[in-house]
Amino acid sequence: MRGAHSQGKLKRPHCVDHPDESAGELVAPGGLCFSPIAANQSDIATFRTTAFIPGNVVKYWHVDEAPAADAVKHCVTKTMPDPVHTPERNPSQSMFRILSEAPPPLAPIHLKCGTELTHRFVRGTRYGYAPGMPGHLVGTYYGEPQHSAWTVERRRLSAPLRPNSITVIPDRHDGDWEVEGPLHVSHVYLTNERLEHCRTLIGGRGNVELMARVGSEDAVTSQILAILSNPDVIADPSANLLVDRAVDLLCIQLLRLHSIVQLPQSLAHTRGGLARWQLKRVTDYMLAHLDKPIGLDELASLIGLSRYHFCTAFRLSTGLTPHVWLSRQRMLLAQRLLSDPNLLISEVALAVGYSTQSAFAQTFRRIVGTTPRSFRRSL
């Protein structure tokens, strides 16, 4: 087992607390993490090794590595809280504790079932054991490829972490990591509740069990994760429909390609589009609430559909996703409001559901082809 500061393989000598332990590599259940804690002029280095062992026990071996002597000074067994089962409020806090790094930069957005998103951030080099965490972590990568390996459930998964690849750490899966840094990443944290909800709505059978992945090639899932790490998207209240749908698509991709669950042949149960009354009800609702955040569950509940089936049916009826349709209607209203010289551009932005003028200007330019200021001058 390689450690963050180890200088090579250590031999297992006689342990005074466990005289029957045989010689070999220093490997214990759950893995070991080596770190030098002292050295003297005789090149005798003291290593402290930590092993997380089932039963809430942590063992510390203090080893002297010398040219002529190889002996364990003492082996201490301590009872400590089990890191796998210590209650955590959310997966991101657990990951922060595991990595012993600065907390991942969580996006300031509230999502259902405890789902959390991060902005893109940089992780350093990591070698050592990481206990399991509650919930599922899905991550993707940006920039130069970096070496990574994860020993989990007696298997060693190894692949370069590169763009268009993903890593999946399922619920409460521990193991030993080798990750070279710096690494540009973004994460999404999903709860079991979120994935089970998705499985139920699309008609899947059996319990959801994600498969461990490291650097797995999956361009579609990687692009979804990139969208969910984009600050221009996740910080914009008017993009709630887009974020909701992106998380739905992420869950479907994970269930399709990275889980052990039986899915129906077709994920879309809706054979056609919405009935005329259904389309009128949801479009009238959106037009009446252009100044407010609108979610997919909110729209789907108006006509008694799940949000998965609603999105498919709406697109079949209009040729557009709900998010694109709503954005276009907001920009049509914005053009009418900009013709009033008494209204500030910031006031127009608020009137069409944008909390920041910059987010409004970006969407306006993408749809209309010019900035709100230039559009007003052209009137």
Image (tube, grey):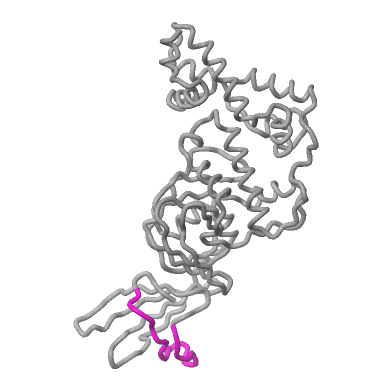
Percent coordinates x, y for residue 179 in the rendering = 43, 63
Q: Quadrant of the N terminus?
A: bottom left
**In the picture provided, is 218 more to the left or to the right than 70?**
right
Q: Is residue 185 above or below residue 353?
A: below
Q: Is residue 102 above or below residue 298?
A: below
Q: Tell me which corner region of the image, top left, top right, bottom left or bottom right, holds residue 249.
A: top right
Q: Nearer the viewer, residue 33 or 364?
A: 364
Residue at 41% across, 10% down: 377
Percent coordinates x, y for residue 265 in the rendering = 77, 50
Residue at 59% across, 59% down: 170
- Secondary structure character of the magenta stretch overall: loop
Q: Is residue 38 above or below residue 316?
A: below
Residue bounds of the magenta highlight: 6-25
Residue at 71% across, 24% down: 282
Percent coordinates x, y for residue 151 in the rendering = 52, 70
**In the picture provided, is 112 more to the left or to the right than 31?**
right
Q: Nearer the viewer, residue 101 or 145?
A: 145
Residue 54 is a magenta residue: no
**In the picture provided, is 144 more to the left or to the right than 355?**
left
Q: Nearer the viewer, residue 251 or 30?
A: 251
Residue at 45% across, 75% down: 32
